[in-house]
Image (cartoon, grey):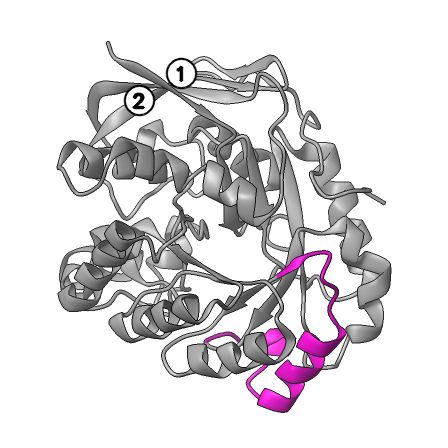
Amino acid sequence: MATIKIHGMIDPHTHLRDLDWSHKATFASETKAAIAGGYWAVFDMPNTSPSTIDAEKLDTKLAKINENAYCDWGLYFGASQADNTDQYKAIVQKVCGLKIYNNSTTGDLLIDNQEDRDTHYHEWSDERLIAVHAEDETVGDILELVRKYNRKTHFLHISTQLEIELLKQAKEEGLPVTVGVCPHHLFLTEDDLSTIGAYGHMKPELKTKADQQALWNAIESGIVDIIESDHAPHTIEEKESANPPYGVPGLETTLPLMLQAVKDGRLTLERATDMVSTNIQNIWNIDVPAETYTVVDTEASYTIERQNLHTKCGWSPFEGMTVSGKIIEVWIRGHQVYDGEQILSKRGFGNNLFGTTI
């Protein structure tokens, strides 16, 4: 056995469901999955049902996750078409950031008008970053706002060569931008859809092998800052229906997949671990509590199988893949919360890393 210790693993891009979508997953089930995946903390997106777009709905969600989380956590607030900027001052210190959906979403969270985006950028506070869903040319539109307001902006789930080129130029310009990439875009392409079908449907969708290679190149060159799962569980019945929803789970497979990439010589161990811990801590300006770490046996190899997953949805797009790196211990604030098999923390153990709960 060869073990490593990773201090303070964080996934800043998850959809934990619960509330009206508790049939898909709950704060309890998915924070357990996070621990089994090695994570100290997870940040939950605002496109739940109901959407997290006003102070009342935020407080309801804060109270619910506070009662049920097994690991530490943070919540995003969502920018709304209905212009909810008057809410920002009251909520900014309770959340990990503002999420703006600029592409590929529905309802009251899609902001596809540049003037509306400008309003949200103008009104948001420098106390927290802005996280954006922006695809293709829209990345350039958002960079115009970053340039105008100098607001710290994290680009989520980047998936194409074009997007990488735009963000490379932005970093060379010195703009305050960071870049996240998901394992499903690193390990799967559109060619896999013929095999996995709707289990490979997500937003942004799977791309070409050339796009995938551009992501790996960007990891090697340092353009990519972090690996985020975009964990988005749906039930098996929903995925196998005539109208399957977009989204895949990833909390329990992200670290093993990246460690398999290390074994395959695609990146260094230091780079892999920094992208799931230190870099995220620096971007969100978080200090890791004492005795908060994950112990991994880097020599252990196993096959991803749905019966071994903790996520409520009970499946993975990576089923059947062999990975390296078995998580054997997780400690949070001096408490062992995982022993390699069982979750040891209690419901409600998790803390909000971003201020008050209610």
Residue placed most toward the observer, 267 or 315:
267
Tell me which corner region of the image, top left, top right, bottom left or bottom right, holds residue 66: top right
Q: Position of residue 34 (x, y in %)?
A: 49, 34
- Give the amino acid at mark 1: Gly
Q: Alpha-carbon distance for marks 1 and 2?
A: 8 Å
Which quadrant of the figure contains the C terminus? top right
- Examine the structure image and report whether residue 85 is included in the region drawn in magenta: no
* Label 1–label 2 contact, CB within 8 A: yes
Q: Position of residue 127 (x, y in %)?
A: 73, 56
Which quadrant of the figure contains the N terminus? top left
Q: Secondary structure at mark 1?
A: loop
- For label 2, the residue is 326
* Residue range corresponding to the magenta coloring: 104-129
Q: Residue furthest front?
A: 173
Q: Is residue 243 visible?
A: yes
Left-right relation of 280 to 181: right
Residue 340: which disc? 1
Left-right relation of 217 to 52: left
Residue placed most toward the observer, 210 or 240:
210
